[in-house]
Image (cartoon, rainbow, N blue to C red):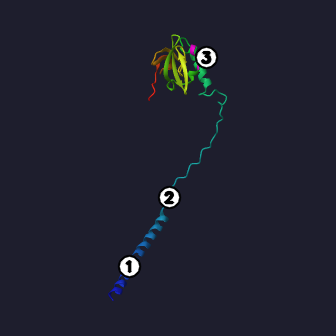
Amino acid sequence: MKRPALNTAALALAAVLAAGCSAEHDELQQWMEQQRREAKPNVPPLQPPRKFDPQPYTSAQAVEPFSNQKLSVALKAEARGPNSLLASELNRRREPLESYPLDSMIMVGSVDKQGQPYALLRVDNLLYQVKVGDYLGQNYGRITRIAETEITLREIVQDAAGEWIERPATLQLQERAR
């Protein structure tokens, strides 16, 4: 008999506690409603967008600032100057190996033909023979000496001040790793 009485007491206690929570819950709901009514948002109105006035593009017929045409005109104008290193370089016919950067070329050997030294260069899996006086690289590089283990050349480049200067460069013999 004690058990049903204990269960009844537990149920009565739970009902009293639930009624107490319900009263608190109602009070909380009323407070929330009051706050919603009293709160007035203060948002400033948005500014209307400015009118867009399109401007016509008037430079369509002008020379593009990054075109090869503009660069070649500037180089030729600079080459006409006194003591210019570029004058003779711009007036000669370009050689095939001048279209490749120097660091893409690999010296794979050297040979002597009739007493004149030749170097063997590999570029794009093709083998080329070059001699002293030939041009290679994209900086007007001209071969000045060929030894068994290296090619020495002079290049014409611009320095930090924009002046054209000569600088030496070399290509070393590359031995294959086995």
Q: Which mark is residue 93?
A: 3
- Position of 158 compared to 64: left or right? left
Task: Where is residue 7? Give x, y as percent.
Answer: 36, 83
List x then y, in percent, for residue 134. 54, 16
Question: What residue did someone put label 2 on?
Answer: 41
Q: Which residue occupies the foreground of this view, 38 or 101? A: 101
Kind of residue at badge 2? Pro
Q: Is residue 92 magenta?
A: yes
| Residue at x 67%, y 28% (from the top left corner) | 61
Which badge, 1 or 2, comes first in the chain's sequence? 1
Farthest residue to the top: give it.
115
Q: Report helix, strand or loop for mark 3.
A: loop
Cα–Cα span, label 1 and label 3: 104 Å
Label 3 packing within 10 angstroms: few (<14), some (14-19), many (20+): few
Q: Earlier in the sequence, mark 2 or mark 3?
A: 2
Judged by depth in the image, the label closer to the viewer, 1 or 3, is: 3
Residue depicted at 40% across the width and 74% down the height: 21
Q: Is residue 163 visible?
A: no
Q: Which residue is denoted by mark 1 in the rendering?
A: 14
In the picture as drawn, the residue positioned furthest to the right comes out as 61
